[in-house]
């Protein structure tokens, strides 16, 4: 009996020891996992990517400690910032907070949440003047339209051989107003008269002058006939289908024969949900295990012309086979990189000479392989100064000039068009 109790006691001790050892190992592993971002700040992983992709900055640097700055307040503020940026699961916690806020709010600092959780960019309403938006008033729109009329006269008088197209891309709220929240509708009503004035003025001129495109009418008609959305629910921008509607409209305006031989087809197994407005809310990607925002996936399209061959894209003096290769290598990560694209034809027409396209993020680098297939040589620059060349000089150097701008930036572009004194 004594021997049996002794054996049971020893066995219990052994099991208890193994149990304590297991808990010690598990606890150590958990602490190591939680502390890893602090021990290895250069491998911030998810949270470093979250900072770069969503907050558009790098993790705070560690201070350079010397004998003289140990007691400086700034040193400890730098340490606090660096630690905060490297807290484990920081990005996930911010996303979770943003998701929970979406359940009870329809207005944020830069974003409105509409019906079916479509997102709208508040700066596109025209209420305030910022670096990313124009303020719309009737008086300002009238001045801008008067400037446009003087520009059209100036161009016909001084540079009649240059082909010009002005393409103002509508804001999402102008094409998909049915998803707007009541607060957004109230704000848009304050600038509605000024914006309607611009829409009518552009439409009136487009009816008699091929140099001006009425894209509000084009997109509204396309919305009724397209099986694909023309704007991304979680983004400020149009979808790939909307971008190719713009490109095809440009081709049709420049040369109907070019538009006639284009094929716009979806790329298999590729979709796009956009997301710049999602990023503004602090949501990097679809959040699991549940998701408040709609899981939107829109098809991605490409434009092809049989007999048109790319000779390459030149960026900062370096040649790449095409825009896709340059994007894959990270060369076109910035919206402001200028580029030159050349094509040759084995039969179909190309617009000869040099073409300048001033464009913004609505014709971003993902569209360039499609966009440039109408031209033998295309120079691409961002519309906004200081990234765009002087417009008066451009009319001396180029044979075709396309001015593409988003509606929320349209007034400032019209205000700097060249005119006679």
Image (tube, grey):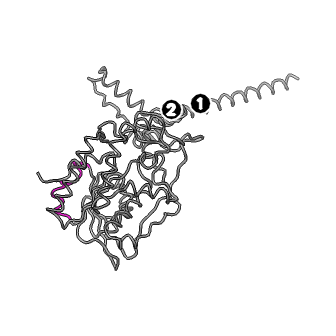
Say which element carries label 1: helix
Image quarter hosting the N terminus: top right
* SS at mark 2 in the image: loop
Residue designated by label 2: 105
Residue 334 appears anywhere in the view: no
Instruction: Indicate whether residue 240 is drawn in magenta.
Output: no
Residue count near mark 1 (Cα–Cα under 10 Å), binned few <14, some 14–19, many ≥20 = few
Name the one closer to the observer, 113 or 203: 203
Q: In whole angstroms, how far apart are the C-alphas of marks 2 and 1? A: 39 Å
Quadrant for residue 116, please give it: top right
Closer to us: 76 or 17: 76
Horizontal side, residue 42 vs residue 163: left or right: right
Label 2 or label 1, whichever lies nearer to me, is 2
Res 28 visible: yes
Compared with residue 58, is residue 416 higher up or lower down, i.e. above or below?
A: below
> What is the residue that sits farthest to the right in this orientation?
1
Q: Which residues are magenta?
A: 384-398
Q: Which residue is pictured at 31% across the width and 48% down the height?
A: 198
Q: Is residue 396 magenta?
A: yes
Residue at numbered disc 1:
27
Residue 310 locus on image (x, y percent): 34, 70
**Residue 215, image x, y percentages:** 37, 56
Q: Residue at x 40, y 56 (%)?
A: 217
**Residue 121 locus on image (x, y percent):** 41, 41
Write the residue at 32% across / 30% down.
63
Label located before the other in sequence (2 or 1):
1
């Amino acid at each position: 009996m004594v021997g049996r109790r002794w054996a049971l006691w020893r066995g219990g001790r052994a099991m208890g020891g193994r149990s304590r050892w297991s808990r010690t190992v598990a606890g150590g592993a958990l602490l190591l996992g939680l502390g890893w971002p602090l021990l290895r700040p250069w491998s911030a992983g998810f949270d470093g990517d979250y900072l770069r992709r969503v907050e558009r900055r790098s993790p705070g640097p560690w201070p350079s400690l010397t004998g003289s700055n140990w007691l400086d307040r700034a040193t400890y503020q730098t340490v606090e910032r660096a630690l905060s940026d490297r807290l484990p699961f920081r990005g996930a916690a911010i996303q979770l907070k943003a998701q929970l806020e979406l359940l009870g709010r329809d207005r944020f600092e830069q974003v409105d949440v509409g019906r079916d959780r479509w997102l709208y960019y508040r700066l596109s309403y025209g209420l305030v003047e910022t670096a990313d938006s124009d303020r719309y008033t009737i008086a300002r729109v009238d001045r801008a339209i008067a400037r446009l009329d003087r520009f059209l006269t100036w161009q016909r008088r001084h540079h009649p051989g240059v082909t010009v197209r002005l393409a103002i891309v509508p804001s999402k709220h102008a094409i998909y107003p049915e998803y707007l929240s009541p607060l957004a509708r109230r704000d848009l009503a304050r600038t509605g008269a000024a914006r309607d004035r611009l829409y009518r003025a552009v439409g009136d001129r487009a009816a008699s002058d091929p140099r001006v495109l009425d894209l509000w009418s084009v997109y509204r008609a396309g919305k009724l006939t397209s099986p694909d959305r023309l704007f991304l629910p979680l983004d400020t921008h149009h979808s790939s289908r909307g971008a190719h509607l713009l490109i095809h409209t440009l081709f049709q305006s420049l040369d109907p024969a070019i538009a006639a031989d284009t094929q716009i087809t979806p790329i298999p197994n590729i979709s796009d949900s956009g997301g710049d407005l999602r990023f503004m809310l602090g949501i990097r990607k679809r959040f699991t295990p549940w998701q408040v925002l709609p899981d939107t996936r829109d098809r991605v399209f490409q434009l092809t012309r049989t007999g048109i061959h790319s000779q390459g894209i030149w960026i900062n003096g370096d040649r790449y086979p095409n825009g896709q290769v340059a994007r894959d290598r990270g060369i076109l990560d910035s919206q402001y990189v200028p580029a030159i694209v050349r094509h040759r034809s084995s039969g179909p027409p190309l617009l000869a000479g040099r073409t300048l396209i001033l464009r913004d993020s609505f014709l971003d680098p993902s569209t360039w392989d499609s966009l440039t297939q109408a031209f033998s040589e295309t120079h691409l620059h961002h519309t906004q100064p200081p990234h765009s060349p002087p417009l008066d000089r451009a009319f001396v150097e180029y044979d075709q000039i396309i001015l593409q701008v988003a509606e929320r930036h349209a007034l400032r572009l019209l205000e700097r068009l060249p005119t006679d004194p």
